[in-house]
Amino acid sequence: MQIPGPNDPIVTPRRPAPARADGKRPLLGLAKPALREALIEAGIPEKQAKMRSQQVWNWIYQRGVTEIAQMANISKDTRALLDAQFVVGRPEVVQAQVSTDGTRKWLLRFDDGEEAECVFIPDAYRGTLCVSSQVGCTLNCRFCHTGTMKLVRNLTPAEIVGQVMLARDALGEWPSATGPALPALPEADDAPDDEEAPYIPGAHNPGANYTTQGRMLTNIVMMGMGEPLYNFDNVRDALQIVMDGEGLGLSRRRITLSTSGVVPMMARAGEEIGVNLAVSLHATRKEIRDEIVPLNKKYGIEELLAACAAYPGASNARRITFEYVMLKDKNDHDEHAHELVRLIRKYKLPAKVNLIPFNPWPGSIYETSTDQQVSRFSNIIFEAGISAPVRRPRGRDIMAACGQLKSASEKITRAELDRRAAEKEAAWVD
Ligand code: SAH
Ligand code: SF4
């Protein structure tokens, strides 16, 4: 079976979307027209369907109700009709952890028992939710824990939107059933981006609209488990719901999609989703990128940067983020930084670089670059006029940092890791 993406087939042990044991369908994740259709199929008279679907939508996305029974302005009989066939739909929380730095991680279990993780990262200016797009990942970046997972399935729109809903439940940021709706967030995210201000638990953190206006979750990054561009349709449909002004209302400027470089899907991502783009570059030379991001053997660096240059919507006001994981003595030499600057200039990219110190995990084969080398690397890029902040690892104590996400802790040997990598690469179709 193939993952969606007409130009880029990749074979994967993807499983079908889960069905609930009770046969009910989740309402979560249905776009407005699909929601209306679903209500008609369930027996709501056609002339009422528009109004009913609007009511249901508002209860779900503006009030955060988790039960159909809570939809107070819908008659009892209609609620019973809906209740017999639908659930609102929330992933089950198997584990919730809070780091000493305020980062929270949830391990979620879906209807078929598969699990994925979702992480909330508060800083002084914004609250960012890191959302997963797949269970596992069909790619196999050598430094990434998720890439070692064997099982892979795409998350459904309900499961992707469900992560946002769940985070808002846990952060307590729904208004009451009768109180005023939450004030809309400003569309643009004007908080300073290049400096990092620590989140101070318990204090008023001024930049974000924390607590006083009840909005802690201000930004979303598709940087959890999985490669979002190998689950294109579901990610697009889910993000469209997240961006809808009559619901969760997070603008496309507050959402960032990170890809390891699925070149054929990048233009569509810009056109059909329109969110900010982050690209996991991690190396500037073929032999190094081939090793650490094996997808590079299929879509090389130059091809990837050309696709970035053509990304719809990229501009100096909306720069493309290049993520660069700092691996000691692998990709962290001064010359690599100079090469990165040369490439960004060659393709005239409106770019910023995020330097991510490598986050180790049990069994990982790389080491984190020294702090001194990370600053040298950052300075070289910065002196060329390109911003290159170093991302402090967040939630390391609860294994919530970048690339550490992996639900089942499974002990695997190096040989098994290599075997899985080879198997996944062999599945690529050219
Ligand atoms: N699959 C997508 C998005 C998920 S990974 C992608 O690869 O872009 C989100 C980011 O975390 C990517 O830049 C990824 O390369 C980085 N990452 C993965 N493992 C890491 C690790 N162990 N330490 C630091 N960053 C890591
Ligand atoms: Fe997949 Fe991204 Fe991890 Fe690579 S870094 S294995 S693409 S999740």
Image (tube, rainbow, N blue to C red):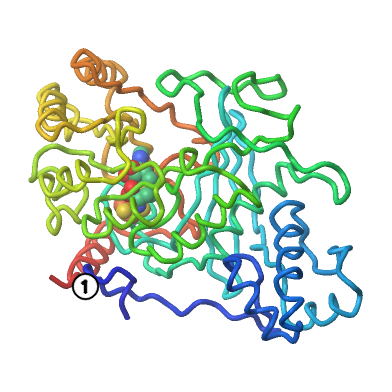
Above/below status of 405 relative to 88: above
Q: Can residue 111 be seen in this view?
A: yes
Above/below status of 280 relative to 48: above
Determine whether, in the image, residue 301 is placed left or right of residue 361.
Answer: left
Determine whether, in the image, residue 67 is placed left or right of residue 345.
Answer: right
Q: Is residue 363 visible?
A: no
Percent from the top left, x then y, of residue 2? Answer: 31, 76
**In the depicted view, which residue is nearer to us: 41 or 323?**
41
Task: Identify which residue is drawn at 76% across, 76% down.
Answer: 48
Residue 389, image quadrant? top left
Above/below status of 406 relative to 47: above
Residue 299, image quadrant? bottom left
Quarter of the image with the N terminus is: bottom left
Task: Identify which residue is drawn at 70% across, 71% down.
Answer: 50
Q: Which amino acid does label 1 sit on?
A: Ala
* Residue under label 1: 427
Percent from the top left, x then y, of residue 343? Answer: 12, 32
**In the depicted view, which residue is nearer to us: 381 or 65?**
65
Task: Identify which residue is drawn at 40% across, 68% down.
Answer: 152
